[in-house]
Structures are given as C-alpha cells and as structure tokens.
Image (tube, helix red, strand yellow):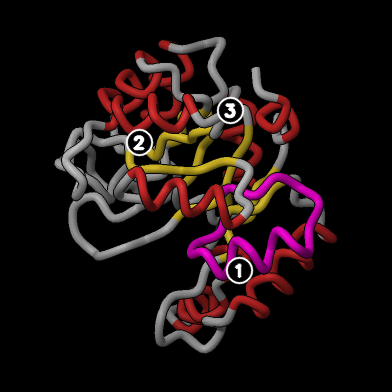
Amino acid sequence: MNPVVEKIKGGLIVSCQAYPGEPLRHPETMAQMAMAAVEGGAIGIRCQGLSDISAIKGQVDVPVIGIWKDGHDGVYITPTLRHARCCAAAGADIIAIDATDRPRPDGLTYEQTVSALHNEGIVVMADCGNFDDAKRAADCGTDIISTTLAGTSPGRPKTDGPDFELLGQILQAFPNYPIICEGRIHTPEQLHEVMQMGAWAAVVGTAITHPTSITRWFAAKL
C-alpha cells in the first residue's frame, strides 16, 4: 500500500472548496481554511482547482487530495487524463477522479485512465456513486474507493445523510480495501458511525468549510 494512503487511515479529511461567484472563492482563503482544519485535527485535505491545490500544498504538511471540476453535467470531477496529470503537477498527493461508467470527454475509459496514472506513479481515488462503480475501481486496482458521488450520479437515491447502506455494501465486498466515506456527513455523530462501520477515513466538507450552507441550515429553523 502506498505510504500516503496509510497516512490518512482512521482520520478526518476536510474538503476545502468554494465555487466561482462565492465570497470565499480565492486560493489564499482556501489555504487558510485548510490550515485551520489541520490545526483542528484534520489528517488530510481535499481541494478543487490547480490554484487551490498549489496554495494549500504549500501551507499544510498533510496529504492533499486534488480534483479539478470542469463542467456541471456528466463526468466533471477530474474528467480527463490531462486534468488528473495537471492536479498531480500542482502538488496533489492523491488524485480523485469520477469512477462512473459515463463517457469521459477524452474518450478514455475509467480503467484506461487509472492505468495511465499508475504508470506515472500517481495515487488514484475513485469517486463512486454506486456499488458497480466501486467494483470497477477495485477490479482495476484503484488505490482508494470513496462514496463521493452516491446520490449525485445515476444509480442511487440521494440520502439525507451519508449513504450508510452503500458504505456497508462496499466494506463487506472489499474488506481489505481502503474505503472512504464522503458525502453529506453533517454531524460528529454521523462521522463516528461511518468510522465504526470500518471506513478507512472520512471526508467532511460542507459542514465544516461552507459557511453559506451552514447558515442556511440554521436560518431554515427560524
């Protein structure tokens, strides 16, 4: 197992992302957010975009999971081999890519993309939406499997919190694989539950680093 994968075992990975048009959309701001998360106990950071990856990697000493979102429909999380290579060049220790069977913009399959990245020594994390995605990722030797796209890609309904059912299915099928739970972990109790189930690590984003969404949660209760 790659040493960088070992480093995130049993811990909390914080996703620091802001999108175009949002008030916090600035690499320096995301780097400061990442630093604050590490100070609070994060053992890894997930971030989006080449500028953010570079800025964050220069400020933290924990593994950085990099993605490049390009577009809004279909495969848009690190959609091509070029996007993945650029994330690695920007400094990401792990590259997360869409692991669904949907067509990729460069015409490569998921398996071909992973093979090319592995040949270059790049650690790959599979952002999966259902069990078939996880099996595809495992079959081609992806380094990490994650539930990132559960409920946001075809194949499964969107759950109110984490997709505990999918996580359980993947953990049971691949007991010796690093499985990360990501997606709608909104409370410390939910984080505790997914880790008790046997997740290798967990990614929390919105509930920690997206104040607009957090404020909406509170405002909705007024």
Quarter of the figure that contains the N terminus: top right
The tag on residue 209 is 1
- Residue hosting label 3: 199
- The amino acid beneath tag 1 is Thr
Q: Residues within 10 Å of mark 3 (few under 14, many from 20)?
A: many
Q: Which residue is mark 2?
A: 128
Name the residue rendered at 75%, 33% in the picture: 7
CA distance for labels 2 and 1: 22 Å
User: Which of 222/40 is in front?
Assistant: 40
Q: Position of residue 53 (x, y in %)?
A: 59, 61
Q: Nearer the viewer, residue 186 or 108?
A: 108
Residue at 25% over, 65% down = 71
Residue nearer the viewer, 92 or 89: 89
Amino acid tagged 2: Cys
Task: Measure the alpha-carbon separation of dots 3 and 2.
Answer: 15 Å
**Answer yes or no: do the residues labelled 3 and 2 have beta carbons within 8 Å?**
no
Q: Residue 184's spot in the image, x, y percent?
A: 46, 52
Of the two numbered discs 3 and 2 on the same chain, state the one appearing first in sequence.
2
Please state the horizontal and vertical placement of residue 82, each as a whole percent of the image.
36, 49
For label 2, count other residues whose C-alpha is less than 10 Å away and answer few (under 14), some (14-19) or many (20+): many
Question: Does the rendering let one see residue 8?
Answer: yes
- Specify which label sits upstream in the sequence, 2 or 1: 2
Residue 162's spot in the image, x, y percent?
A: 45, 43
